[in-house]
Structures are given as C-alpha cells and as structure tokens.
Image (spheres, rainbow, N blue to C red):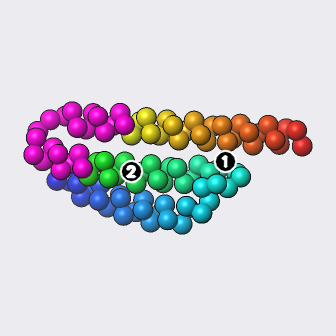
C-alpha cells in the first residue's frame, strides 16, 4: 500500500515537471534536451509502479516488480543514449567553432 501512495505522490510531482519542460524537448542544448526525457520517464515509471502496486496487492509475487524494474532500466538507457548523442554533437560543434 505504501508503494501505491509513494508512486501516486511522485506521479503528481513528475507530471508537474513534464508539462513546463515539454516546450524544451527539441531545444539545441543537451541539458535542455535531457530534462524532458528524464521527467517524462519518471512519470511513466511512476505509472508503472502504481500499476505494479495494484497487481501485487492481488498476487503476492516479486515478478511484477522485477519486470517493471527492467522496463524502467531499458527506458532510461534509451533516454541516456539520446542525451549522449546530443551532447556528443554539441561538443563536436563547439570544437569546430
């Protein structure tokens, strides 16, 4: 039950972060580009955590937590890859200037 409460609280905070950052998701700077996927992924993770909490209330199993944890890791790895490429491109552009 605590997992659900914390997940819902974090979801509200993260949705509040995502909305103002949405306009910067295509900005040229790597830090600005990183902020939106980070907040968005946190919101998606919170939704998954809440759903997992509901599932584990019904079935006492660690599998839902494990599956969601792996999915969150994959989602964040993909976002990190995008930020890495943006930062590398930004660095290359600065080196040419």
Q: Nearer the viewer, mark 1 or mark 2?
A: 2
Q: Secondary structure at mark 2?
A: helix
> How many callouts does the rendering have?
2
* Cβ–Cβ under 8 Å for marks 1 and 2: no
From the viewer's perspective, tell me whether residue 51 is left or right of residue 35. left
Q: Is residue 62 left or right of residue 58?
A: right
Q: Quadrant of the C terminus?
A: top right
Instruction: Residue 32: tell me if it is visible.
Output: no
Circle 2 Cα neighbour tier, 10 Å, few/some/many (<14 / 14–19 / ≥20): some
At mark 1, the secondary structure is helix
What segment is highlighted magenta in the picture?
A: 51-71
Residue 93 image-quadrant placement? top right
* Residue labelled with disc 1: 30
* Quadrant assignment, res 73: top left
* 55 in the magenta segment: yes
Q: Is residue 30 left or right of residue 75?
A: right
Overall secondary structure of the magenta section: helix
Which disc, if any, is residue 44?
2
Where does the image place residue 11, in percent across and percent down from the top left? 35, 59
Mark 1 Cα-neighbour bin, 10 Å: few <14, some 14–19, many ≥20: many
* Residue found at x 67% / y 55%: 27
**Residue occupying image coordinates x 49% and y 60%:** 18
Question: Looking at this rendering, what residue extends furthest in the front direction?
Answer: 26
Based on the picture, tell me whether residue 77 belongs to the magenta stretch. no
| Image position, residue 7 (x, y; %) | 29, 54
Sequence-first tag of 1 and 2? 1
Residue 79: image x %, image y %?
53, 41
Whether 8 is drawn above or below 29: the answer is below
């Amino acid at each position: 039950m605590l997992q659900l409460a914390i997940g819902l609280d974090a979801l509200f905070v993260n949705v509040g972060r995502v909305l103002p950052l949405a306009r910067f998701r295509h900005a040229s700077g790597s830090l600005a580009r990183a902020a939106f996927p980070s907040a968005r992924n946190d919101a998606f993770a919170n939704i998954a955590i809440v759903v997992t909490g509901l599932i584990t209330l019904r079935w006492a199993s660690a599998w839902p937590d494990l599956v969601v944890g792996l999915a969150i890791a994959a989602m964040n790895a993909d976002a990190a890859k995008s930020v890495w490429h943006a930062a590398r491109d930004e660095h290359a552009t600065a080196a040419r200037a």
